[in-house]
Amino acid sequence: MKWKLILPLTLLLALGLTMQASAHGARIEYTISIAVEIRATYDTGEPMGGGQVTVYAPDDPTPWLEGVCDEDGRFVFTPDPSKPGTWDIQVRQAGHGDMVHIPIGDDMAISGGSGYTPLQIVLMGACVVWGFVGTAFFFSRRLALSLPKGRA
Amino acid sequence: MHIPDGILPAAVSVAGYATAGAATWHSLRKINQKEDPRESIPKASLLTAAFFVASWIHIPVPPTSVHLVLNGLLGAVLGYYAFPAILIGLFFQAVMFQHGGLTTLGVNATMMGVPALLAYFVFRLRSVVGKESRVWTGVFGFLAGAGGLGISVLISLVLLITTVPPHLDVEAERASIYALTLAHVPLIALEGVFTALVALFLQRVRPELLED
């Protein structure tokens, strides 16, 4: 009679332990953080693949993170949310490169960049070229006006 | 070729401004000694525009691309006007398009302007062997155009190789600098030919533009 009670109790105990072990199988927690993706290209549009990236945290001149752009010139990193302010990211390759300043915190933008559109470039370039041509015309005119006087 | 802001140490940038200041002072002094210093300003202004635009003309040299510089041409045609012309062109390139930089303006001006003055002295040597000869004008035009850019490329190579920050992968950066320097070799030949053609053209249609 004793054995008839002990055997079922042992089985129930074993089953209970197993169920308890199953409940400890996995646990997932999450925190939302902001990732920054940059894409570095030369002014021809060619990606700066293999460009060396240096990330500077706000108010800290020592590099916070270093890495390398992928073949498409992309690099992704997650800034430390406890350091709000302007993060500086420099990409360098063969002595060429650029630095972009990304505000992280209350006044951050979804996207941005350090270049101009082609239309802006053409307009600005045309203005500067016209300045040089105008200077040439101005001094040519002075020369033309001064020649008769000199001869007279 | 244009070294941007944030690449060179501050001491090199300051030294660049010092050498550019000395070269500008010397060039302006020489220009002021001319009978009419304003006479060549239209020519200098138009070639400054050409220098300003030249950096947009990219030539693919796989796996990268290089852009025209034309500092040797400016030296051969403008003489002492070349240095201030290059300085002004670089200033507008830096301010308008961030091509180069304001902290590196002195370094870039020295890197391109001093070889332009050397190109001028090389081009002047044609008067020793025969100024009227079209062959010698072509030869010295080539030497001025190719030599001007070649010396600039060498200065750029030395500056960049010796100042790679230690926190970067120095070997990888140096390898890419060597590759970019080699990519300039075809451009050096191209600018030599272009300068020779321009010199020959000017000698035929307006020879007075090539006078000192």
Image (cartoon, helix red, strand yellow):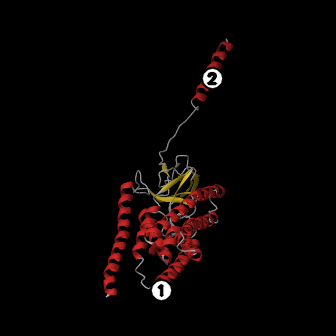
Residue B114 showing in the rendered view: yes
Q: Residue extending furthest top?
A: A1
In the image, residue A24 above or below residue A126: above
Q: Dot 2 corresponds to which residue? A: A13
Number of numbered markers: 2
In the image, residue A151 above or below residue B168: below
x and y percentages locating residue A107 in the rendered image: 39, 57
Towards the viewer: B19 or A60 = B19
Q: Residue at x 43, y 65 (%)?
A: B50
Judge depth for marks 1 and 2 and give the one in front: 1
Q: Label 2 sits on what residue type?
A: Leu
Quarter of the image for the N terminus of chain B: give it. bottom right
Q: Is residue B129 left or right of residue B54?
A: right
x and y percentages locating residue B143 in the rendered image: 58, 67
Q: Label 1 sits on what residue type?
A: Gln
On whether disc 1 and disc 2 are found on a single subunit, the reply is no
